[in-house]
Image (spheres, rainbow, N blue to C red):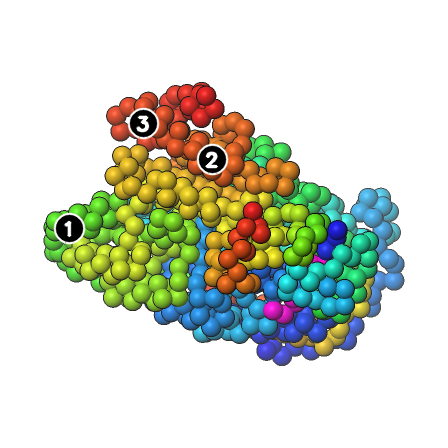
């Protein structure tokens, strides 16, 4: 098991949360003072490129847990260099938490409360991963070859 | 008539609602009328059935016969392995399906 | 073959522990079936007609004796004494209890096996040429790349909730024995102009409701970039694939809707962005994996002579034995298609026997094929007779590779909750109708494939003759298709006319076969004659 401290609120950041809820992508791009955006499944997060500096919070919605578009959106944002809060909201179940963390999510707003014990187990189950992703976990191929 | 069927959550085998419980034998299946959904919800929530659903059937002297061939195969077992059927010694099982 | 290191083992073991926990939560009612279903599918556990079914992965169709013996043990201990080899080189057990599933996975993990991503909307088992490492016509053994891709696609965090399932097929030969053009992504290993290893990348193939032959989107991709390139393909699809209609969510639909050129452009654009992020698995890792696939210690200078005086042995050699790149060796196919049998089914005892043969005669190497047979890839010609005798005694020596009785059939309505019709009884009737070995040889190569529903797990679109089971007002009805091929000349079969009853389709196939014999010219297979003369003569023969 990985020894990692899991915060009870499942927010993996030390900074203050943004106090504005996310507006839609179009609205965000239209309002230079907005700092929070809410991304829906079909949104193209690459449009946020020019506005990354002012962005404090991106909420990515999972309308149904099976809809995996949010994972790509998250990872793209981290690849673009976004370091602000990345929050998975909606139909987020405990068994998706690890994949979400690996794609760069650092906070969670599930529609239904998660069982914290189960969540902690889910997040620490795997010591090793096969791929490099957005969470900094060193992939096995790197461990093998230094 | 309408039967309520599903699979046993742990064992996986086919079960039929009898009116006050679940049986592996379709002959004991009850006509659930229009109460099937209600019963299904209660039973699924209590984990006494997995993936319940309602099927059509015709009554017969030996019990309900599901209308669709798929449900008749579920009731009996794979037609190509009669030795693995619910009642392997039952010679008439094959004619039940087709 | 590849052997797990401590990392691989830890990952599989963690998966078992995780699933054990998930099963416990399901049984305790902490999850609905709707929530649990994707999780159990990610571990290959289906709910089928009669019980849970477990699909165990046999990565790129390579397995050793120790692993086979565990499969036999699972069949005996947790199932009903048999297993079923599938059209994606995996094995299925049909009578599993939910409570036993974690224990089964634990036993599999001890021999470096798993059921990870064999179902659900995941990246599935990678299929590969069953003659890998043995055939003379391949550029290199494709399996190290298959293993590398397997690791890369296992628990990929971005691609675990895809629009639909995703299947990758791999070959290193111009003779495509892995049907790569009917996969979501098909990869052919080639050498570039300067000897560099690369892939021809095909995308958007598949069967099912809307079959397509894959498009070539990249003529040469340097092999070391395969992971980032696959990532680009998957990301474009994950982001833009449909999510509104389960029947329209495979990548083939997106490729078709955008057009192959536009799809390729989007992939290239994505790839340009990500290829320098350092996510590719480096060449050193490929080389580490490839070291497990060096040629076995073949004896040198062996004779190619064979005593064919036993006519039944000779018939088996003629059909089921293929040339090997090493003199004195051969590739032998174990037929799982006896007359009247269930295609792809093997008993636990048969699995044990096959394990012994693989261990003793084939450098401990066995290859399930997508045609539901098994291959011993490296046997000495001098051992063929002993092998054949052992197989013959166990009902595994039917000399029918690629003949009409070498039928591919899905489990069908006898087992599968998705099916419209049964397929196994039809396969049995067909093998009985065409049982005569001389007749089969006269007909020659004829790939007959049966699917019990439009999901096409029997690959009927790719059959020279394909049969599709449909539900016609509650009765079983069968459509007949001609002219499909899964090989490098991939094509999709065309429906010949109105459907038939089960007995009717057997008669129709027989009439079609006789018409082929009337019309064929020198050396033509059924497929060739059909392609030459078209449907009309066959329609005429069948419908009068």
Image spot of residue C439 (x, y percent): 28, 37
Question: Callout 3: residue from which chain?
Answer: C
Q: Is residue A91 left or right of residue C40?
A: right
Residue C366 against residue C482 in the figure, above or below: below
Asked whether residue B5 is drawn in magenta, I would say: yes
Give the left or right position of residue A116, taking residue A138 as reference.
right
Question: Dividing the picture into quarters, in which one does residue C159 lie?
Answer: bottom right
Q: Which residue is mark 1?
A: C310
Instruction: Specify start and end residues of the magenta stretch as a single range.
Output: B4-11
Residue at 20% across / 51% down in the picture? C313
Q: Nearer the viewer, residue C460 or C312?
A: C312
Q: Residue at x 26, y 45 (%)?
A: C319
x, y percent for residue C139: 32, 46
Query: Could you say whether the residue bearing mark 3 is in a helix, strand or loop?
Result: helix
Pointer 2 or 3: first along the chain: 2
Q: Secondary structure at mark 2?
A: helix
Query: Which residue is identified by label 2?
Result: C505
Q: Residues within 10 Å of mark 3 (few under 14, many from 20)?
A: some
Tally of numbered discs:
3
Which tag, 2 or 1, sits closer to the chain's start? 1
Q: Nearer the viewer, residue C495 or C37?
A: C495
**Whether residue B56 can be seen here:** yes
Q: Are marks 1 and 3 on the same chain?
A: yes
């Amino acid at each position: 098991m990985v020894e990692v401290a899991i915060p009870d609120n499942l927010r993996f950041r030390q900074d203050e949360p943004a106090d504005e809820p996310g507006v839609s992508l179009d609205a965000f791009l239209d309002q230079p003072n907005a700092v929070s955006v809410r991304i829906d499944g079909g949104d193209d997060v690459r449009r946020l490129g020019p506005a990354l500096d002012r962005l404090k919070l991106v909420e990515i919605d999972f309308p149904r847990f099976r809809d995996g578009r949010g994972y790509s959106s998250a990872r793209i944002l981290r690849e673009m260099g976004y370091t602000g809060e990345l929050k998975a909201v909606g139909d987020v179940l405990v068994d998706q938490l690890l994949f979400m963390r690996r794609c760069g999510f650092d906070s969670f707003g599930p529609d239904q409360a998660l069982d914290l014990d189960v969540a902690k187990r889910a997040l620490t189950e795997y010591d090793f991963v096969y791929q490099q992703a957005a969470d900094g976990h060193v992939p096995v191929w790197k461990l093998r070859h230094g | 008539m309408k039967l309520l069927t599903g699979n046993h959550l742990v064992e996986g085998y086919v079960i039929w609602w009898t009116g006050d419980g679940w049986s592996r034998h379709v002959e004991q299946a009850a006509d659930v009328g229009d109460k099937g959904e209600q019963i299904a919800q209660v039973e699924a929530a209590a984990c006494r059935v997995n993936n319940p659903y309602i099927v059509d059937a015709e009554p017969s002297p030996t019990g309900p016969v599901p209308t669709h061939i798929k449900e008749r195969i579920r009731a009996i077992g794979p037609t190509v392995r009669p030795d693995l059927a619910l009642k392997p010694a039952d010679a008439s099982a094959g004619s039940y399906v087709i | 073959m590849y052997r797990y290191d401590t990392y691989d083992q830890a990952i599989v073991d963690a998966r078992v522990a995780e699933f054990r926990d998930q099963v416990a939560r399901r049984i305790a009612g902490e999850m609905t079936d709707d929530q649990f279903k994707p999780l159990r599918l990610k571990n290959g556990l289906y709910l089928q007609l009669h019980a849970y079914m477990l699909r165990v992965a046999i990565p790129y169709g390579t397995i050793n004796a120790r692993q086979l013996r565990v499969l036999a043990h699972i069949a005996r201990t947790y199932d009903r004494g048999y297993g079923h080899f599938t059209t994606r080189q995996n094995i299925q057990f049909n009578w599993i209890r939910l409570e036993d599933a974690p224990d089964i996975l634990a036993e599999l993990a001890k021999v470096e096996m798993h059921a990870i991503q064999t179902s659900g909307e995941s990246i599935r088992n990678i299929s590969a040429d069953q003659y890998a490492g043995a055939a003379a016509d391949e550029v290199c053994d494709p399996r190290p790349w298959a293993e590398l891709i397997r690791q890369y696609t296992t628990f990929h965090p971005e691609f675990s909730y895809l629009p639909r399932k995703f299947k990758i097929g791999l070959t290193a030969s111009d003779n495509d024995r892995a049907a790569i053009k009917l996969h979501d992504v098909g990869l052919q290993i080639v050498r570039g102009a300067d000897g560099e290893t690369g892939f021809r990348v095909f995308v958007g193939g598949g069967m099912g409701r809307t079959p397509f032959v894959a498009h070539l989107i990249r003529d040469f991709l340097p092999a070391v970039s395969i992971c980032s390139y696959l990532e680009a393909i998957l990301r474009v699809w994950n982001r833009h694939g449909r999510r509104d209609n389960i029947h329209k969510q495979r990548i083939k639909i997106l490729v078709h809707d955008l057009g192959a050129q536009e799809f390729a452009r989007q992939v290239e654009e994505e790839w340009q962005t990500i290829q320098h992020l350092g996510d590719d698995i480096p060449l050193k890792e490929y080389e580490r994996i490839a070291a497990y696939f060096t040629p076995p210690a073949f004896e040198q200078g062996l004779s190619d002579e064979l005593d064919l005086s036993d006519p039944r042995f000779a018939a088996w050699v003629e059909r089921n034995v293929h040339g090997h790149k090493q003199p004195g060796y051969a590739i032998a196919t174990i037929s799982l298609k006896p007359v009247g049998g269930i295609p792809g089914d093997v008993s636990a005892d048969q699995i044990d026997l096959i394990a012994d043969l693989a261990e003793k005669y084939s450098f401990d190497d066995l290859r399930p094929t997508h045609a539901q047979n098994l291959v011993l890839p490296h046997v000495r010609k001098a051992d063929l007779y002993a092998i054949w005798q052992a197989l013959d005694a166990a009902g595994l020596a039917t000399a029918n590779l690629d003949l009409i009785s070498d039928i591919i059939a899905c489990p069908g309505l006898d087992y599968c909750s998705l099916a419209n019709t049964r397929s196994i009884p039809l396969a049995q009737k067909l093998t009985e109708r065409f049982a005569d070995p001389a007749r089969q040889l006269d007909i020659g190569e004829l790939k007959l494939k049966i699917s019990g529903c439009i999901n096409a797990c029997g690959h009927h679109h790719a059959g020279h003759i394909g049969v599709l089971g449909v539900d016609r007002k509650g009765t079983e009805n069968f459509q007949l298709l001609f002219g499909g091929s899964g090989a490098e000349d991939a094509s999709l079969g065309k429906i010949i006319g109105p459907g038939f009853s089960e007995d009717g389709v057997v008669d129709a196939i027989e009439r079609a076969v006789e018409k082929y014999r009337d019309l064929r010219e020198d050396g033509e297979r059924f497929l060739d004659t059909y392609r030459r003369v078209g449907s009309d003569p066959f329609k005429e023969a069948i419908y009068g």
